[in-house]
Amino acid sequence: MKWTWVLVVVLLSFGSISLGKESLDFPEYDGKDRVHDLNAKNYKSVMKKYDIMVVYYHDHPGSSRAAQRQFDIEELALELAAQVLDEFEDEDIGVGLIDAKHDKAVAKKLGLDESDSIFVFTDDEVIEYDGELAADTLVEFIYDVREDIISQLIACLILAIKSLNTDFSSFEDDPQSFIPVYSPLYFEAYADAAEEFHPHILFYATFSPKVAKALDLKLNEVDFYEPFMDEPVVVPGKPYSEKELVKFIEDHDRPTLRKLQPHNMYEIWEDDVDGEHIIAFAEESDPDGFEFLEILKQVAEDNTDNPDLSIVWIDPDDFPLLLPHWEKTFGIDLSHPQIGVVEADDADSVWLDMDDGEDLPSADELEDWLEDVLNITSLLCKINVMLYTECAVHHMDVFYDDEI
Amino acid sequence: MKWTWVLVVVLLSFGSISLGKESLDFPEYDGKDRVHDLNAKNYKSVMKKYDIMVVYYHDHPGSSRAAQRQFDIEELALELAAQVLDEFEDEDIGVGLIDAKHDKAVAKKLGLDESDSIFVFTDDEVIEYDGELAADTLVEFIYDVREDIISQLIACLILAIKSLNTDFSSFEDDPQSFIPVYSPLYFEAYADAAEEFHPHILFYATFSPKVAKALDLKLNEVDFYEPFMDEPVVVPGKPYSEKELVKFIEDHDRPTLRKLQPHNMYEIWEDDVDGEHIIAFAEESDPDGFEFLEILKQVAEDNTDNPDLSIVWIDPDDFPLLLPHWEKTFGIDLSHPQIGVVEADDADSVWLDMDDGEDLPSADELEDWLEDVLNITSLLCKINVMLYTECAVHHMDVFYDDEI
């Protein structure tokens, strides 16, 4: 038997008698303030102290009590994140705030233009975090940032063997690349390209002919797995340069079906297709939602070559706090699967009537509907423009917003 | 074509031009205080106003700044939950606080003994919430409470048809029952039993012979699906009374493999087996973790009749804020799968050495290890008792805690 096991006994000090129960408790704020207010005087010395620095470049909070309390919530979320990140002994991770009113100059020096965003500074790069401002989601993102790209590549030797019997593309909802690498030359271009997309896209490599064969990978070739697709796309034009790899991935990083998650929600929302999003609500842990998701995957698979089709799948379970808001805004009942086309700028929307989920469409019917409705919503846009013309004040408001 | 579709056009008012972007924003605290401080004078009138009342019976916050800020975090989480729940127009859902120091008498009148817990009052029952005090997890639990048991039963007519091609037991991590019902008499006993476990255990019913046949269900028979098991257990002794059904479910509600989730974490932790928990960490979205979870399921399936075996599966992705704390407490690296036996009271633990995940055990090897280690930890307990005897002060502390 190749595999052996050893017992590791961890005897904790008796001082922590209630540790058993505490070991499950969510960390409570310990009262130590860790979040730095960064300004022109201190930002250099503070940032020098940390290996990774998380900076929230925030709008100046309003003076109303609501705005103050909201800022309290955000600050406490960051304090909690800083406290958790403080537990890592091998790396110093700091958290700081930059006020867009008082310290715009500091933000500018750090190369940040867009306020109300979080940026993660590492040795080599500045990574924007486009997700929910919540301690758990942010901390999880930092974990991904901390993953070393190269070790992640090498780890795949094992990972890939383990995953041979499973659907490789199902592991993560982000697109991922895969290369069987033997030559250090290829490896370098690949690793450099990987760095550009870290931690948003996962990169794997294998040095094992057996693994490569099982995955149908040719030597020094990169395969690109789109989420929810069984078959990868072979990146053309090898030998690849870093530039070519980056270009290919940039051209292909809008999948036909993608999952909205707390850590990527704003990023996806900004990436609309002609001002529209196709939004599908499906609760995976519910039989109806599960079935509907299978239909969506079928539609995505059938249309993966259509660059105009990108369906955003939202699992309502991931966003309990937004549910009533979405039901109101879109006028739909989210206890059943729903699919619709939503205008990215004003949230006008058109939804497929599925009779409260009792009558799910087939993949073909859904494709027909999408074709029809994408035309119809173009028509709707024209009507909107007409209405704007009739209502000149609002039209100007729009222009005004755009010009700011 | 039986299935038809209709366009539903929602044209929103022009006042909400930026609604598109806002429709994705997490709700921000609007400054309106909705959480009630319940006391002897107001609790009756406040609670009368709501259809559902969520009450946090909390320990009196300490006077330190840390304790105050921590209580702030909890209060703001409840305010946010109250604000989201306020959006439901068909039901009034209120949130209140009871201070265990000042208003113990109120808690007593409401039948609450255990402080530091959240209770949900509905028309018929008081349901304890044993999960994380976070707005999203709590709100999701309230959604489950709001689900009507009877409509859930009837909805299964459709749900079951849709799920015929899929693994029924995979939809939820809680055990669930299933009955093909034709007689109102049976239905009533079943519905009454369902009420006892709502919303923790899901109950389904079908009136369709076709569905019943596909699920291999006999008329007026209840099948019980344990999580992660393909085959259900037929509840013996029909015709069933409510009492018999409740007893059977109570006797079987500790599954062989169960998933720790933010909404049930404290409940599961309190349900230890002889003072111990078998804890398995496996990240489902990682190939290694996925593979290890498959092995765990195999072990659970092989040992489903062993009442002494209950493995708690934790997906580290669900608990980012606890990761560094667990790594420290247990002395393990959570970037790989881990399995160990943890003492519930003092968190002493023993872990299987899997060579950083490079060498996953087979199901048989894992079973052997569990058998061995469960003996070994019994031995460890004895050592602990000896050490307690030598360290009398701590021993007494334990007694003191118990007596309170």
Image: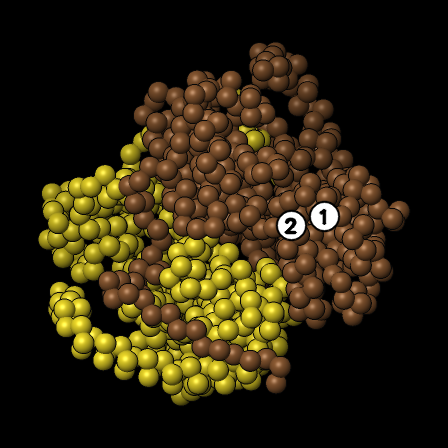
Chain colours: A yellow, B brown
Residue B142, which numbered label? none
For label 1, the crowd category at 10 Å Cα-Cα, with few meaning under 14, some 14 to 19 and many 20 or more, is some
Between B332 and A183, the one nearer to me in the picture:
B332
- Residue B162, quarter of the rendered image: bottom right
- The residue that appears at 74% across and 61% down in the rendered structure is B206
Residue B71 x/y as whole percent: 38, 30
Q: Which residue matches tag 2? A: B149
Residue A234 x/y as whole percent: 47, 84
Between B73 and A223, the one nearer to me in the picture:
B73
Q: Which residue matches tag 1? A: B191
- Left or right, A30 with respect to B146, comes to left
Residue B323 x/y as whole percent: 48, 44
Vertical comparison of A383 with B155: above or below: below
Label 2 amino acid?
Answer: Ile
Label 1 amino acid?
Answer: Ala
The residue at the far bottom in this view is A237
- Looking at the image, do the residues carrying marks 1 and 2 touch, with CB atoms under 8 Å apart? yes
